Amino acid sequence: MPPMLHAILLLAVAATATSASAATAPAAARNSTSNCTVPLPDAGIVFAAFKNVTNFPLPRRPSCRPVRRLAYPSRNLAGVVGWAALGNLSGLLTVDLSGNSLEGDDCFGGGALWRAPLLRSVDVSRNRLGGALRLGASARMASLNASRNGFTSVVGVDGLAAGLVVLDVSGNRIAAVPEGLRRLTRVRRLDMSRNSMAGRFPDDLPPLDGVEFLDISDNNFSGVVNSTWVTKFGRSAFLRAGNASSLVIEDNPPASAPAPAQATMTPPSGRKKHKRVVLIVVVVVCGVVAVSAAVAFMAGCVACGFNRRKKGGKKAAAAAAWEDDEVAVGAVKVAATAPVVLVERPLMELTLADLTAATSGFGRESQLADVGGRSGAAYRAVLPGDLHVVVRVVDGAVAGVGGDDDGDVAAAAAGLRELARLRHPNILPLLGYCIAGKEKLLLYEYIEKGNLYRWLHELPASSMDMEETGADMWDTTEQNKKSIDDWPTRYHIILGIARGLAFLHQGWAGSSGRPIVHGNLVPTNVLLGDDLEPRISDYIHPMDSNNGEVAPESDVYSFGVLVFELVTGQVRWDDSTVSWARGVIRNRKSLNIVDARLREEEEEGGTRGAAKTTMTVAEREMVECLQVGFLCTAHSPEKRPSMQQVVGVLKDIRPAPPPAGGAGETP
């Protein structure tokens, strides 16, 4: 038997043996929780706040643990919340009741909600709240999202000036700029679009030098929007922000470019002819007539004008359909009529011009922050059918895909189709693609929750948490938990990443049967879905210029480092920190480097203050997962296990009940 496989089997045997010796630990923990001697008033407070709200799971028993998160988004809640009662929750951090049918005029907040001393994030967007949005003094409040309701005014906004970073009141019926808005000197994201606000720009707004995102479109502002603000926030931030006679929007075209001019577009042949909206940079291909004019155009560019329209209650993105013209994707100009292929929607006819329109001409306002991707800039877009996608631009050949810079479009398309057929719960699927010359635009599903790095290192300590999802405090079953600070969730993420990586290594893509090697498995390339299921992204990347073959063993090493990061909670791993962790594990001191947040969960589960002589089941699982990381980070690649073997060992560490009907699991 090979030494490497022997080590794996020894680890699996050890996991099985140790789990049996600690089988009574969960029961002890449950008994400790149920024998609560000093219950907190939080259960009664929550009961009083939600007693008139249908579909809310009211508490049935006292609790010894404070309520920290009330996260019930899109739960079909209806009725009137007693907001004043929630202000008495001394440990409350976040409230997310978005996407429900909560009602009430002049009742939200009322000043009392903001008394909660630790409250930092509130999201009541997409409800039926109305009247005045009444705010109160709060030193810790960092994020407030009250968009898409029926509020008619905002009162007391200056009470949040000490810490407010994000304010979204878009999609309401607010008639005047909130008094005191100028005092929000720390705000970085401000969305007041789609109201009927009357105000003076920029005098009535916070200092714009520190604002990173601004949208005041569809309002009644007056004043002058100079070219500095147009350049910083994009012209879409000021669309229909006021009458043309009262709000002047200055343009700032490049010095060598002619002034912007209106243009009428002609749809390509074979498609339905109608006027489309344009906000993209083009190069007009003139004929032999007016050669001098063509030279002038090639020296600069023409910024096409745009019309405005609405669709489905949302601002429609600028759309364009070109026949013989080109669009700019990055620094390259390519044919606007290049088709977009959506693998699972073959009847949807889209072109590069549609992608250009959906991304505001691949503009900065649509660009996503680069968080570890190697495949070029990424842009968010909403396609017909409310399909939310990320468009990633790749220049040149793509690893694992046929075709090269010489323009073998057929081979490249065949390779991308093969990759788009890959489906696994733990990889981010390629939804479609567009090949335009050397440019390849790859379409992926947009994951709103963000990446693993954000959840592991930013959200717990950040004051800008808008989307943190907490667990129902009344339901302690593992499948209902939505926090990354508990061990079952972290183990689930570790196992999911291992399964996704094993799937890529199987070599099921294309006829070559070669494994897909990621080559850059880091937390920013692992996205988390609504259920915190991990999805590996950025496994399709540009070809290495040196044509160096990357072996699957490099992914195994990166996975081991990722295990270290998830169990210890430490950030920024390199060769020295990996060597340090391996030394601690080798000396059987693994518990000393386990993330303190996970240890606190264990203590709150019933072991706090007790004289511990043995490890709990969860602690043993953490130690054994660190041992898996130890094996995966072996210095010699040939000593590292395969990802398929890693999946088997991880499943033995924490056995799961068999699926219904006896169906087998995906690796």
Image (spheres, rainbow, N blue to C red):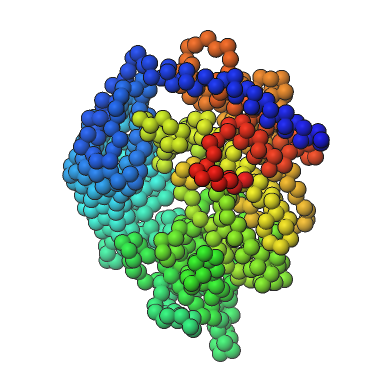
Which residue is farthest front?
Answer: 661
Number of labelled discs? 0
Does residue 487 appear left or right of residue 125 in this picture? Answer: right
Q: Where does residue 557 sit, x and y in percent of width and height? A: 71, 39
In the rendered image, is residue 457 in sight?
Answer: no
Q: Where does residue 86 sit, x and y in percent of width and height? A: 27, 31
Q: As rendered, which of 67 and 234 lies closer to the eye?
A: 67
Does residue 244 appear left or right of residue 189 in this picture? Answer: left
In the rendered image, is residue 244 in sight?
Answer: yes
Q: Residue at 41%, 61% (x, y): give it.
A: 386
Q: Where does residue 58 sit, x and y in percent of width and height? A: 28, 32
**Image quarter in which the C terminus is found:** top right
Which residue is farthest top?
Answer: 611
**Image quarter in which the N terminus is found:** top right
Residue 135 to residue 367: above or below: above
Which residue is farthest bottom?
Answer: 289
Does residue 609 appear left or right of residue 472 in this picture? Answer: right
Q: Residue at 61%, 52% (x, y): give it.
A: 538
Q: Where does residue 274 sit, x and y in percent of width and height? A: 39, 79
Q: Residue at 42%, 38% (x, y): give it.
A: 469
Q: As rendered, which of 453 and 232 lies closer to the eye?
A: 453
Q: Residue at 18%, 44% (x, y): give it.
A: 105
Residue 460 to residue 292: above or below: above
Does residue 540 appear left or right of residue 24 in this picture? Answer: right
Q: As rendered, which of 309 and 478 lies closer to the eye?
A: 478
